[in-house]
Image (cartoon, rainbow, N blue to C red):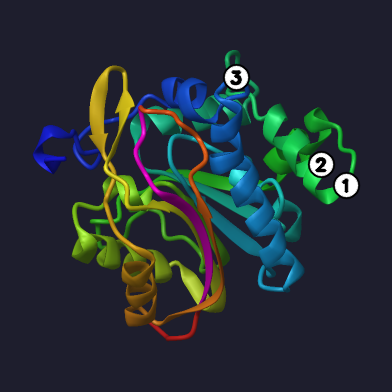
Amino acid sequence: MDSSACSHHFTEDVDPTFLHDMYFGPYVEEKLICDVIEFPIRAIINCYKQGLIKGDTMIDFSYAANIYQILPIYKCFKDIIILEAYDSCMKDTENWLHGGEHSLDWSHAARIMEELQGTSTDWKEMEKDLKSRVRHFSKCILENENPTDPIVLPKADCLVNLCLLGTISKDIDHYSRNVKKMSTMLNKGACMIIIGVFNASHYIMNGKKHHILCFTETDLRKILSDNGLRVAHMEVSEKTSCIKTVTFDHVFVVCAVKESCD
C-alpha cells in the first residue's frame, strides 16, 4: 500500500491501552497470541538456554508499554532500565510501577511462559519482583545525541526491543541508524534482542492506519552486520493469525552480540 496513507509514530503518540486490548491482551485472537506473545517468549527462552543472555543491567526499549517480552529473562539482571518512546507510554509505565488502577494485565503472558518452561509461578509475586529490579525509567528519543538527555545511562549488558523499531523507522537507512544508536547503549559483548515482523505494511489503531516498515531477513542481517552486531541466534515464524488489522508475513526474534567498540 502507499505508505503516505499511513500515520507515522515518530510524529504521533500512541494509545497503549488500545494496543494491549487489540493486539497483546488476554482476549485477542488465540492465533495472534501465539504469533506475537508465545513465539517470542519461546525464542527468548532459547536464547537464554544458549547462554547468550547474562550480565547485571538490562534495558527494555519496547513498543506501547509492553513488558511480557522480558518476563523470561528479567531474573538474570540486578538492574532493569525501561525506556519509552512516547509520553503516553511513560504515563502507563509509571502507573504500572506504582501499582495504579487500570494497569495493563500481563498475567496471561506469565501463564504462557510457565507452560513453555514447565514451571509454576505466582504472577503477583513475579510482577512484584520485576518491579523491584527497575532502577530507572525514562523517555528515549533516538534522534538525540544522548537519547535519554539529560540523564546519561550506564552501558547495559542486554537490550530488548519489541516491535518498536519497525514503527519508528521511516526507511531501511533510518532503521539502521536507530540500531546503531541503540548499540551505543551496550557494552562490548552485550546482546541486543529485537522482536519484529517481516514484510509488513501497517496496522490499525483507533480506526487509523499506522506505519510498519517493510523489510526482509536479508535486510535485517545486513543492518546488524553493518553496525558491528553478530547474529548469534534467530528464529522466524510464519503468521498464523487471520487478523486483518495488522499486516505482516513473519514474526522474528534475533539475538545479536555487539562485537565492535563505539
Residue under the point 12% across and 33% down: 5
Q: Which residue is mark 2?
A: 115
Q: Earlier in the sequence, mark 1 or mark 3?
A: 3
Above-or-below relation of 139 to 74:
above
Q: Which mark is residue 118?
A: 1
Circle 3 packing at 10 Å, graded few (<14), some (14-19), many (20+), is few
Farthest residue to the top: give it: 101
Q: Neighbour class for label 1 at 10 Å: few (<14), some, many (≥20)?
A: few
Residue 106 lies, in percent from the top left, at 65, 30
Considering the whole magenta stretch, tell me its main secondary structure.
strand
Mark 2 residue type: Glu
Would you place residue 162 above or below residue 122 in this image? Answer: below
Residue 218 bears which disc, if any?
none
Tag 2, which secondary structure?
Answer: helix
* Magenta-colored span: 245-257
Question: Is 112 on the left-hand or right-hand side of 18?
Answer: right
Q: Quadrant of the N terminus?
A: top left
Name the residue at 50% across, 26% down.
20
- Residue at the image position 48 percent from the left and 44 percent from the top: 239
160 above or below 255? above
Is 11 inside the magenta-drawn segment?
Answer: no
Q: Name the spot of residue 40 as percent of width and height, x first.
A: 59, 50
What separation in Å lies between label 1 and label 2 (alpha carbons)? 5 Å
Residue at x 46% of width, y 22% of height? 22
Where residue 100 sits, quadrant-wise, is top right
Residue designated by label 3: 27
Q: Secondary structure at mark 1?
A: loop
Q: Are marks 1 and 2 in contact (CB under 8 Å)?
A: yes
Write down the quadrant of residue 73 in the picture. Answer: bottom right
